[in-house]
Image (cartoon, rainbow, N blue to C red):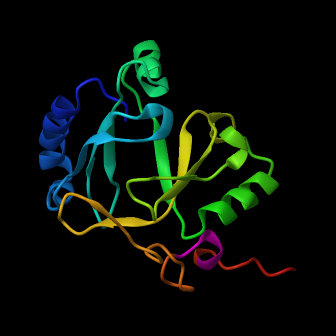
Amino acid sequence: MVVRDLDKAIEDWTKILRVLDPASLEERIVKYDEFSSGDDAGMKWATFVNNGGTEIQFIQPAPGTPMGDRLEKVGEHVHHLCYATDDVPGSMEKLKAEGLHLPGGGQTYNDPDMTWQKWSWVGHKSTHGCLIEVASPYESRNDGKWHHAPGKFAYKGPGEHPSFAEMVPPVAAE
């Protein structure tokens, strides 16, 4: 979520999660007070880590950056959902082949502060309003930082992460 005041967002969401999802408060928050991210350099962000569920991340953009300008225009809002994959460039090629809207043509970006981190975007025109980040898998080691976690979300076969096809047997032809 894009927010005006990172510390206030952390404070408010700590209160919300304390009641609705206390497991999200068990791990240390991953927080960067200044993050170099291309045109949006200078942003601050923090993530409530939940290794078994949904993680919530807040971004406080620097003034005069593209994301800062968007905050001024739109106000605080949900910015994106993130899906992790071990092969960001390969996934982007597959998404491109599907004909989806990919800002920057599906270009993969690399973070200079976390050299293992790669990411790209699926645009709102294909997702019905919410930007989708496609990123290298990462994990918290309860030290306030992100660490590369290759294979963290790898599908290992039936029963581990059942797809619809595994949950619902095919209908026999009559």
Q: Left or right: 142 with respect to 103?
A: left
Residue 96 percent coordinates (x, y) = 76, 52
Q: Is residue 77 magenta?
A: no
Is 140 above or below relative to 112? below
**Magenta stretch prevailing secondary structure:** helix
| The quarter of the displayed image where residue 152 is located | bottom left
Quadrant in which the N terminus appears? top left
Residue at the (23%, 32%) spot, across then down: 6
Residue 89 percent coordinates (x, y) = 65, 61
| The quarter of the displayed image where residue 88 is located | bottom right
Residue 151 percent coordinates (x, y) = 47, 78
Is 51 above or below relative to 121? below
Relative depth, front residue between 110 and 12: 110
Magenta stretch: give its range. 162-166
Q: Residue furthest right?
A: 174
Q: Left or right: 123 with respect to 79?
A: right
Residue at the (53%, 48%) spot, across then down: 133
Residue at the (35%, 26%) spot, across then down: 62
Query: How many callouts does the rendering have?
Result: 0
Quadrant in which the C terminus appears? bottom right
| The quarter of the displayed image where residue 75 is located | top left
Q: Residue furthest top?
A: 73
Q: Left or right: 132 with respect to 72?
A: right
Is 45 above or below relative to 151? above
Residue 59 percent coordinates (x, y) = 34, 36
